[in-house]
Image (spheres, rainbow, N blue to C red):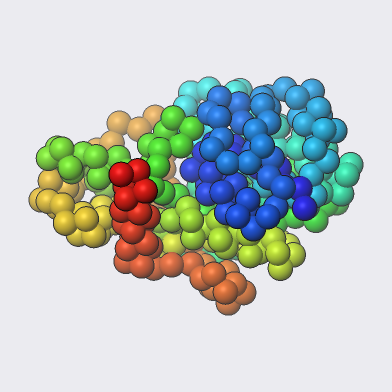
Amino acid sequence: MKVLITGAGGLLGTSLSMTLESYNYEVYSGYNVSLPLYGKPIKMDLSDPNQINRAFEKIRPNIIIHCAAITNVDMCEQKKSLAYIVNSISTLNLILQAKKINSFFVYISTDYIFSGDKGMYKENDEPHPINFYGFTKWMGERYLKTVDIDHLIIRPSVIYGTRPASGKINFVLWLLEELTRNRSVRIVTDQYVSPTLNTNLSQMIIEAIEKELTGTYHMAGAERVSRYEFAIRVADTFGLDKSLINEAYMSDMNWIAKRPRDSSLDISKAFRTLKNKPLKTKQSLDIFKEEIESAIRSNN
């Protein structure tokens, strides 16, 4: 079974490609800048439809998992044309190529398609993005639903994992670095999310693929927490000084783009359907810590 992963050098793509290879899938790892660690690397600039076409003609994948996107929320607000091309138009081009060869299409969306007015969003709640990043991802969902193709839409929230990916450091690794160096940080108390461990997410996605699930699923952490509360739990897990974590408010942040106040996700559908369940915060952080310690041991 051939699987093409876009953004395979990223946080989720790395975990997916590693796990799928261990399950004996034939993994093709699409990338533009950061060379993937696992799978057969396929150079592919998603803003170039010709490169997408050539990749599909060469590989003819049975499954495509579309992880690639510009996820920098402020950059998307500043460079709207680029964000729309990469996050929306390239998604449509991938969908059309997948339809030609009857590939199963898995689209990694985001909690940021929601306004954040209520939180604990269900799959059938109406999207209403309040920033351009969320809009581009919502457009990807809309394009997918207009084409007659078997598909699965996954919405996670605040993905974190054990290593920097595609040149970016995720929230938890950034926090650990700052606290380890005894630097104080300001974390917002009034933004609520469902933090998602990348290895837990990849296991859920692969199980969903193997079960041939279709439609939309919220696959995220199993708890609604504020960014501040999550940071405190990270510090507790690693025995770091949580007094360095200072309370702040969203209105204090010099963000260019608006953020949803509460984009937490209701994961009850995934919890009912999957054996690999969405994890609560303590369990996922304990696993995350063990993954870091295991990586350190293997490098020594």
Q: Is residue 43 left or right of residue 148?
A: left
Residue 127 versus residue 252 in the image, above or below: below
Which residue sits at x=66%, y=37%?
A: 40
**In the rendered image, is residue 80 in sight?**
no
Residue that sits furthest to the bottom in the current view: 272
- Report which quarter residue 253 is drawn in: top left
Residue that sits furthest to the front in the current view: 300
Which residue sits at x=69%, y=40%?
A: 28
Which residue sits at x=89%, y=42%?
A: 100
Residue that sits furthest to the right in the current view: 100
* Image label count: 0
- Report which quarter residue 193 is drawn in: bottom left
Using the image as rendered, state which of residue 111 and residue 12 is in the foreground. 12
Location of residue 180 in the rendering, given as x and y in whole percent from the top left corner: 17, 42
Location of residue 111 in the rendering, given as x and y in whole percent from the top left corner: 51, 52
Using the image as rendered, state which of residue 266 and residue 286 is in the foreground. 286
**In the rendered image, is residue 51 in sight?**
yes
Q: Is residue 81 left or right of residue 240?
A: right
Q: Is residue 198 left or right of residue 54?
A: left
Location of residue 123 in the rendering, given as x and y in whole percent from the top left corner: 60, 63
Image quadrant where one finds the C terminus: top left
Residue 136 versus residue 231 in the image, above or below: above
Which residue sits at x=79%, y=44%?
A: 61
Location of residue 68 in the rendering, given as x and y in whole percent from the top left corner: 60, 37
Residue 125 versus residue 172 in the image, above or below: below
